[in-house]
Image (spheres, rainbow, N blue to C red):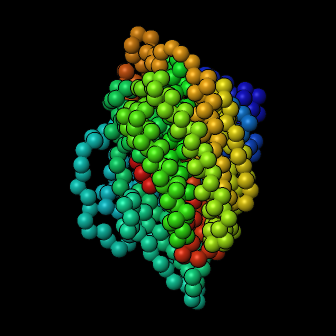
Amino acid sequence: MFAEIEALKPGTVPGLVRPGEISVRITPGDIVPFCRSAAERGFELVDLTCVEGFDREGRASLFYCMEKRGMPEVLTLVCTLEDESAPSVDCIFSSASWYERKIRDLFGVDFPDAFDRRRLVLHECYPEGFHPLRKSVPNRPFSPRTAIPPEEEYRFMPVEGKGVYQVPVGPVHAGIIEPGHFRFSVIGETVANLEVRMFYKHRGIEKLAEGKRPEECVAVAEAVSGDESVANALGFSLAVEKIAGIAVPDRAEYLRTIYAELERIHSHLGDLAGMLVDVAYPVGASRFTVLREEVFRLDRDLTGSRFMRGAVRIGGVGFDPSRDQIRGLSCFLSDVQERFRDPLKVVLASPTVIDRFATTGFVEPRFIRPLHLTGPTARSSGADCDVRRDHPYGAYADIAPPVRVLDAGDVLARFSLKASEVMDSLSMIRTCLEHLPDGPVIAEAEGGGVPDGYAYGMVESARGQNVHLVRVRDGRIDRYSVRTASFCNWQVIQHAVMGNIVADFPVINKSLNLSYAGTDL
């Protein structure tokens, strides 16, 4: 990595250096040249966030986190701004557009040369000049604007031409899901354009974390997205453990891996069932739904929570299964593999299913790097990426996960890949149980507290790469920034539906398994 940094700009001296993470301090004038050089050398923008008061009170600092595939370390460019503006890098990294718009809304940092300057997180009902993540803004309710002038309404991209019609879907949906608006432009039944608008329920998760003790904030991380409780608690804990220098006990590392793979299994089973329901094949979905419910009950028996809340703690885990519980888990694993494989064979032999899945919702490989797509969405379109292998944590350093890669890029590829990952997760849990060490399951920070500092924690959730930036100041959380895989992956659905019919949108959407809550923090 040091050679790569030298190549970006000769004479650059790394700042913070720790296992898996290197940071470099740059000036505002260096932002564009550094990012352009990094992109040319194969780096991708993993995360872009803002921290107020990092160097000087009242000043904003931008953190550009990047990775290069095949390189174990992540590179972070840290830039403290002289005023409330910075040059945009959306022409270098397409994924930067949403990050910059989010920072502009939440911190008031402007990117004057950005190609899209519309609001993202804070819709029209939020008053002008309201930037909730600034330290000067208290965490309390505000008075929304109720009358929005027409000229201030959000402008969707116009698509015009003979026979072009708009089909608005949402933001309120028929199911029990969060709001999101989908503006289709169609010619007949064929989708000519789709524009997605999210962030209807900004929950203030990151603001809520400020001022809390690190151990209190684990529950905040779990609330980012309900079905990623383990992944996000683990990402947050990894960052805090880096800051505090906590060595997690071996037994806890293996238990964390078991819990993470159980979460991956119940997430994928839900996706497989959902895709089949969306093509009117509920009989095939029912077997997967039953298995998913059994996994939830197993989660509850192991940790006291169906979504395994409280399973991960800073320094280890909150639950150490008894021998009887481990024996029950082993018995479940030996039975569930065949019970999963048999209905899978039936489903994949159905002409109706194949007809609806094959060639539908194609994600082109050319979008993977610019949008930083990760997880099954990327792997089913040819990307060989997985945080568990590329930046190993937990027991993954000892038990490397098989990384399945397909190149068809359609709904069928995503269905098949997730089915394979369910089998792989079952196998990994079995291996973890066979090699589960004895010993403690929790370690404390030296001196009983967490020192000042910052660090990134990166994990592979069922949806892909989740990134957590934690800054501790005076023993409490000063800044907690979360970027889930969905934040990046949402942007590709607008391309995946092009040329498909509107009726295929539900199954395309479900195959990508995009989280509303994990995006709208």
Q: Is residue 182 or residue 24 the one in the foreground?
A: 182
Q: Is residue 221 or residue 163 the one in the foreground?
A: 221
Residue at x 54%, y 68% (from the top left corner): 281
Among all residues in the image, which is located at the extreme top? 447
Among all residues in the image, which is located at the extreme bottom? 162
Q: Is residue 485 above or below residue 319?
A: below
The answer to which quarter of the image holds residue 428 is top right
Answer left or right for 223 relative to 101: left
Which image quarter is the N terminus in?
top right
Q: How many marks?
A: 0
Residue at x 57%, y 85% (from the top left corner): 188
Give residue 109's position: percent from left, percent from top: 45, 47
Give residue 290's position: percent from left, percent from top: 47, 53
Q: Is residue 156 or residue 173 the one in the foreground?
A: 173
Q: Is residue 449 above or below residue 63?
A: above
Res. 102 in view: no
The answer to which quarter of the image holds residue 219 is top left
Res. 345 in view: yes
Answer left or right for 88 relative to 295: right
Residue at x 24%, y 44% (from the top left corner): 140
Give residue 383's position: percent from left, percent from top: 71, 49
Give residue 96's position: percent from left, percent from top: 57, 50
Residue at x 69%, y 28% (from the top left corner): 12
Q: Is residue 237 above or below residue 247?
A: below
Q: Is residue 190 or residue 27 the one in the foreground?
A: 190
